Image: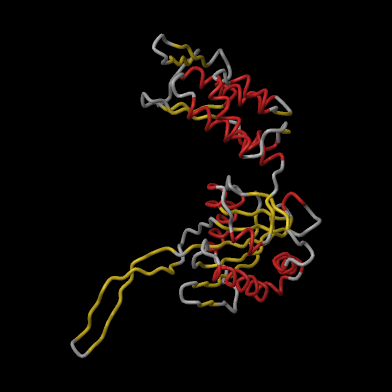
Amino acid sequence: MSIVLHNKIVHILEKEKNNLILTDYESQSNPDTDKMYIKLYKSVATNEFLRKATFNDFEESLIRQLTEDMIYNPETFVENSKEIAKLLFDEMLVSADMESCSLAVALFTVKDEKRVGIFKIDFKKSLSSKIDDSSNGKLVDIVESNNSFSSSLKSNQAVIIGASGINDDFHVKVLDKDAEKNQCDSSFIDKFLDVTKLEDDEYKTKVFKQTAENFITNYFYEDAKEAEEARSYLNYTLSNKDNINPEKFIKDIVKDEDKKEVIEELLQEKNLTDEIEIDKKWVEKKIKSATKKLDTGFTLKGKLEDFNDPMKYSVTKNNDGSINITLKNIKFIEQ
């Protein structure tokens, strides 16, 4: 991924002190800091919880207007970043699910297209010295500081915005890791950004795979061979079919009626009952290899195609329900 960093700035939003510290100048450029911002962009852009989204009120959205102005008029970068910080701070003061933070805003070129990254960097606790000077002498104590800016930037709440009308695939991508993981509301996404996350083919393919894998792990634990066959069937379907019919998939891998009812309810909760068009690009990127952790202490890693090759890998079931895994036609072992 080719990424060029053009502008960057940081503002401080202290919710508990009702203190908004706006920076008047861009951060100075140096190789180490620039690499840190590019790494931050990549970590957000490749995060498994990142979602495509659309603005609820496209024409009136201030976030859209401010970021698009940055893209076409870079001289507005500093002032527009301040306006973005003000908008976030106003929402932060009334939202219980947002804490104090540093707000990093940056302008990048990615694959020949300008994009603005807005990254909420939560404060990290660190230790510092506190000196009290009185008539009785100096007292030095160690205290916790909650506003340190980590040298290794990470963001669990972020948005990447491109110019509208150029590449819809990259126009808006939002991240709220905890909200997405727990399937709960997010003030950062719903109020501050005012966007709706899309349930497109990529999202449905990803969530179906995650839901099916979790179900297999939790409900096939008594029969390791059945679990292995179900995972292989899932990966084969994703890699070789254009669509998934959830009802047919359930019938193919689940024989027990109680287990069928469980996975049916799981898929209903995630709105995955209708036929899903498999996102082949996502599958090609994400389903290339497999890692199998065994309760005997071994971990097997390899290409998915090799696990599916009966000349290289096979599984047989023992009378006690355990399985034997055979790795075939090995000519040498490298240590």
Q: Position of residue 10 (x, y in %)?
A: 56, 70
Residue at 66% in and 51% down: 2
What residue is at 64 percent from the left and 67 percent from the top?
Answer: 7
Q: Please, which colouring scheme is shown? A: secondary structure
Count every numbered label the image shows and give the total. Answer: 0
Q: Residue at x 62, y 40 (%)?
A: 270
Q: In the image shown, does 203 or 2 lie closer to the viewer?
A: 203
**For this rendering, which residue is in front, 26 or 19?**
19
Q: Seen in the image, is 224 located left or right of residue 144?
A: right
Looking at the image, residue 334 sits to the left or right of residue 169; the answer is: left
Locate the C terminus and report the quarter of the image it occupies.
top left
Residue placed furthest toward the right: 165
Counting from the top left corner in percent of width and height, residue 194 is at: 68, 61
Q: Residue 320 appears in which quarter of the rendering?
A: top left
Q: Residue 28: x percent and y percent?
A: 56, 71
As drawn, 268 above or below 141? above
Above or below 290: residue 180 = below
Q: Residue at x 60, y 23 (%)?
A: 305
Asked whether 263 or 169 is in front, the reply is: 263
Q: Position of residue 323 (x, y in %)?
A: 43, 15
Considering every residue shown, the one lying at the far top of the view is 319
On screen, residue 28 versus residue 1, left or right, reads: left
Residue at the extreme left: 136
Q: Is residue 308 above or below residue 263?
A: above
Which residue is farthest bottom? 135
* 289, 120: nearer the viewer: 120
